Every structure is written in structure tokens, then in C-alpha cells.
Image (spheres, grey):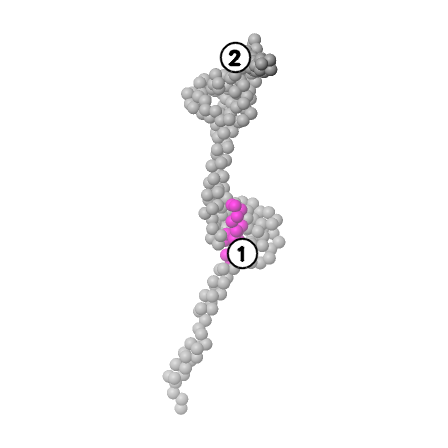
Amino acid sequence: MEEMKTENMEDLGQALEESYAYMGNGEYDTDTLIAWEKINKYKETGEILPVTVSGIVNKGVIALVEGVRGFIPVSRLDINHVEDTNDWLGREIRVRVIEADMEKSKLVLSAREILREESAAARRAQRETAAAQIAVDSVVEGTVESLQPYGAFVDLGNGLTGLIHISQLSLDRIKSPKEVVEVGQTVKAKVIKNEGGKISLSIRELLEEERQKEEEENRSNIPEVEEIGTSLGSLLSGLKLD
């Protein structure tokens, strides 16, 4: 029985100590302490918070988080330049806590990082979709965006870039990509590899295919030996020899 009483007293003492943290400290009331505790957790976790712009101040706007007045600098309202903050009054936006100091009553929020992350994610998704549609052996067109000693990088649009290795730039052996292409030039190339959006291209294979096609056409225009003999026989049959 004595042990049970001791345990109960210890539990009660611990509960009382924990409650003191929410009873204020003489300077801040309970609600303020709880609010700032939540705000600090938001900052640690990077949680996205929906807020409403409730005021306009110099160089920014105001929004409340857990009843605490937060400042959003105009540079952190959007990824684009904001001309007039008055247009944002009453607007609902999503923010993160980037600075929190209860002693200085300083709470700084930002929407810009969230928008940047979402924009980057959208671009990645667009690139992945576009890359998945580029099939090996297909022919693509793009603009040479840079030259390196080992090859040329080609802008294919939709944020995609393909590499033409120096060995795939020409039918002839070359020492530098500058010998056959230049930055800004539009080129056509064959897709020879597409692994996870890493696209390898070849101008050489296209040139090789064109050469083979020309050779086949030239061969098809040469009469067969039998046809030559028949034509010659027909010509001679019309002649009368004395």
C-alpha cells in the first residue's frame, strides 16, 4: 500500500511539473507559450501553413499563425516580382516559418520557397513525360546549346538535352566538335539511347543511312546485264547485213 501511495505521489508530482510549462512564466501567458511552441515545431518540420493576409505594412504583409502576428517580406510573397502588396490583402496563401523568436516577438514567414519547389517539381514531371515519349531510333531536331571536347549538347525542348558524342557527329574522324557544328545551329539526329531521360544522339547514323539509301538508288538505276544484252540483240536484229 505504501509503495502504491509513493507511485501515485510521484505521478502527481510529474504531472504538476509538466503543467507548469503551460501556466506561463510570469512574462508570457499560457496561450502565448503554447502558440510559440507550435510555431517552433512548424519551423523544425518545415510544415506548410495556410494563412490569410490580414494587413499591409512597409516592405511586406502580415498574417497570423496560431494567433501570433507574422511578417511576410514582399520578396517572399511570390516567385515573381510583386508590384503592389495591396492586391494581396485578404488573399489566402501557403507559407513556411523561416524565423521564430518569441523573446523578440519576431515571426517571419515565406511563400516563395513553396512556390519554387512546386514549380521545380512541375518542370521535372514535364521533362519526365517528354523524355518518355522520345523513342530509340526516332529522329529528333534541336539546337546546339554548348560544345565540349567530347561532344555537343543539343536542346530538344521541354527542358530536355541530348548529347552527341564526338564519335557520332560525323562519318569522318574529327578532333573537335567545332569542325562540324556550332552553338545555335539546328541539327537533326537519331536517338540511339534513352535511359532515365539521359538521351544519346547520333548524326553519324543518319548520314550513314542516307549514304546507304543513295547507294541503293544508284544501284537500282543500273540496268541488269540481261536487260543490256536483250536491248543490244533487239538493236542488231533490225540491221540487214549484206
Q: Which residue is mark 2?
A: 30
Q: Among all residues in the image, which is located at the extreme bottom?
A: 242
Is residue 200 one of those drawn in magenta? yes
Q: Nearer the viewer, residue 177 or 56?
A: 56
Q: Is 45 placed above or below 208 here?
A: above
As rendered, which of 181 and 98 lies closer to the eye?
98
Residue sitting farthest toward the top: 26
Instruction: Decide if residue 17 is in sight here.
Output: no
Residue at the extreme left of the image, as rendered: 238
- Residue range of the region highlighted in magenta in the rendering: 190-207
Amino acid type, label 2: Thr
Provide residue 166's location: percent of width, then percent of height.
58, 52
Q: Which residue is mark 1?
A: 204
Question: What is the number of callouts on the image?
Answer: 2
Mark 2 vs mark 1, foreground winner is: 2
The N terminus lies in which quarter of the figure? Answer: top right
| Element on which disc 1 rests | helix
- The mark found on residue 103 in the picture is none
